Amino acid sequence: MRRYRWIIITFILILFIGSSCIVAQFPYRETQVIQDDDLLKEQQVLFIGNSYTSSNNFPQIFTKLAQAGGYNVSALMKAEGGWTLSKHSQSIGSDNLIQQQSLNYVVLQEQSIIPSNPKDREQSMYPAIRLLNEEIENSGADVVLFMTWGRRDGLPESEYNDFLEMQKELEKGYQQIADELNVMVSPVGTAWQNALEKNTQLVLWQEDGSHPNMNGSYLAACVFYAVIFGESPEGLAYMAGLQEDLGYFLQSVAADTVFDDLERWNIE
């Protein structure tokens, strides 16, 4: 009887110890899940602009790229064809989006020609950005200026004979107001220039020589990823349907453009 009693006691002890080990494992696994969830950092981004922003559903490309990097992004867009920032600054709809959302960033994209014209940007673009910047700051969000790109064939009527001539003046137009207000610049146009210098066969425009094709929009999204998250997009799996070698090339160009001169783009 004593032997059987010890067998029973031993069996009960084994069951108790085994159960304790199993119970001890659950909190560890649960902690790991919470840590993984914490890697998804929620951000709300409002894109204000026109057809350059809405082409190829650019905010969605940026959102999916961000998700590939472990960020949970909610992207809103107010982008009407041909709209200027001056028009947005007077729009109740744009104002409501700025005021009614818990935003982290508001992206401002000016009409494609205005930033390259010194007179137009002084009279229209800069006053509008100053007004919008004040509103956005009051809402608690940060401003990011969406530096666009020159047209494929330049702007001959303004004596810009090719892309490079127009791009140089566009960059200057965005940079001046960014430095005045100390706001970040997303140097998409500069990244286009860098990409085209490295690959002369690369096509970034649609047939109209103005709006971006998917290559151009993906490169823009990679630049915004680097600017907003302060991390390189290199190696991210999301390619927006592009071939991997092209996607990785555009990721690399975006990273180099942003991180080679953070001070220039007012990125801390």
Image (tube, helix red, strand yellow):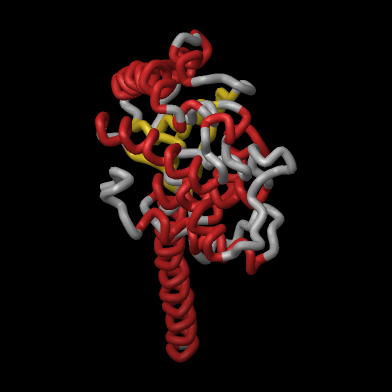
Q: Which residue occupies the foreground of this view, 112 or 216? A: 112
Give me the residue at 69% from left, 58% from top: 242
Q: Quadrant of residue 259?
A: bottom left
Q: Which residue occupies the foreground of this view, 207 or 3? A: 207
Point out the residue furthest to the right here. Answer: 207
Q: Specify whether 42 is left or right of 221.
A: left
Point out the residue furthest to the bottom here. Answer: 3
Give me the residue at 64% from left, 57% from top: 239
Compared to residue 141, the image places residue 64 above or below, namely below
Q: Is residue 158 visible?
A: yes
Q: Which residue occupies the foreground of this view, 162 or 39? A: 162
Q: Which residue occupies the foreground of this view, 259 or 38? A: 259
Q: Quadrant of residue 24?
A: bottom left
Q: Is residue 35 visible?
A: no
Q: Position of residue 264 (x, y in %)?
A: 29, 48
Q: Specify whether 157 is left or right of 123.
A: right
Q: Position of residue 39 (x, y in %)?
A: 43, 53
Q: Quadrant of residue 153?
A: top right
Give me the residue at 40% from left, 56% from top: 231
Q: Position of residue 249 (x, y in %)?
A: 56, 65
Compared to residue 32, the image places residue 218 above or below, namely above
Q: How many marks?
A: 0
Compared to residue 13, the image places residue 241 above or below, namely above
Q: Specify whether 173 is left or right of 70.
A: left
